[in-house]
Image (cartoon, grey):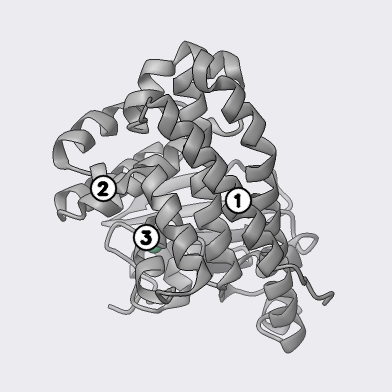
Amino acid sequence: MEDNDIPPAISTYLHEVLKAPALLVGCRAIGLGISKPCCEFDIIVLSNENHPHKVTKLGSHWMELVHIPLKSEVRKVVLDNIEEIVLNDTDDLVLSSIKNTDTNRKRRTTSKSAIARKLLISCLMRHNEIEGMSQRSPIISSMLLKISAYEIMQSLVYFSGLPGSPLHQMDLIRKTLEPNRFESESISLALEIIGVERASSSVLRRSIPSYSQLAAQRYDRQLIEAKINFLYESGMTVDCYYYIGKMCSEILRPLNSNFWQTYGKLIQIGMDLSLDVEHIQRWNSQLTLAAKQLLRSHRTVSAG
Ligand SMILES: [Zn+2]
């Protein structure tokens, strides 16, 4: 089956139950053969009814439905994705008409570069907090540093125009970004901070249940767990380690220091944090320098 072949159970659901304009986005829409069997079908549904995001399993396939208000935000959605496939169009075919025009392609690149620059700025803004916390609270300091390292990786993905999906990030970066470019030094540094060389089955066996506890309230927890289990059982240890750290950092980044303090031990195990103060301080300086250099080398964001 091709990545973007819609399984009959999902197709029937869309056409006979949902009956609303819908777009397929995410790795299944890109069709580069990157999807894994555990990857969901990400579907954006245009609807004026207020539905929460929903993850569900139809047959052996996962599906994630994200509802957005009809038409008002569709242009932004198209720009935020690398590729999309129209599954159900509106009566006036608005989805097909905005898809992949040259103007939208240009806007898409500009919009991705702007997000990448914001991520780098957020890394720079975290520098003092990481430094200040390194003696007092090494767990929080190390967690913030790791969040910054993931932001650097995410920014490189966006600058390169690669799909942003966390599950495929490691794989795409390995395959696509050439060695010996300036970026490769930043990647090596970020991966060193993330700790991929520490990835092992025994580390994963401790961090997987910690992730599940941190993610207890999330609507997509079961889907993420299915992906983690797929990587673990396929022996993709490094990818699995990277993915768990990434998903933990997505959960923890918007939370406050009360939460971080309360669940410090769980965070330390889930993210496999190094608590070596000297390392944290050195890496923090190096990462800040890398973020500054990346910002300088991607200075121009053309208006489009
Ligand atoms: Zn995927």
Residue lying at the far bottom of the rendered structure: 102
Left or right of 98? Residue 185 is: left
Residue 46 visible to the viewer:
no
Q: What residue sits right under mark 2 in the picture?
A: 197
Q: Quadrant of residue 84?
A: bottom right
Q: Given the image, on which type of amino acid does mark 3 rest? A: Met
Name the residue: 74% across, 67% down.
299
Asked whether the beta carbons under mark 3 and mark 2 sit within 8 Å of each other, the answer is: no
Name the secondary structure under disc 1: helix
Q: What residue sits right under mark 3 in the picture?
A: 170
Residue 228's x, y, as percent? 28, 46
Name the secondary structure under disc 3: helix
Residue 68 visible to the viewer:
yes
Residue 286 drawn above or below residue 179? above
Alpha-carbon distance for marks 3 and 2? 13 Å
Residue 138 drawn above or below residue 288? above
Using a 10 Å C-alpha cutoff, classify the residue at mark 3 as few (fewer than 14 neighbours), some (14 to 19) or many (20 or more).
some
Q: What residue sits right under mark 1 in the picture?
A: 289
Q: Given the image, on which type of amino acid does mark 1 rest? A: Leu
In front here: 144 or 281? 281
Name the secondary structure under disc 2: helix
In front here: 189 or 226? 189
The response on whether ligand 1 sits within 8 Å of label 1 is no
Q: Earlier in the sequence, mark 3 or mark 1?
A: 3
Residue 201 drawn above or below residue 292? above
Asked whether the beta carbons under mark 1 and mark 2 sit within 8 Å of each other, the answer is: no
Name the residue: 52% across, 13% down.
136
Name the residue: 35% across, 50% down.
57
Q: Which quadrant is the N terminus positioned in? A: bottom left
Q: Nearer the viewer, mark 3 or mark 2?
A: 2
Q: Given the image, on which type of amino acid does mark 2 rest? A: Glu
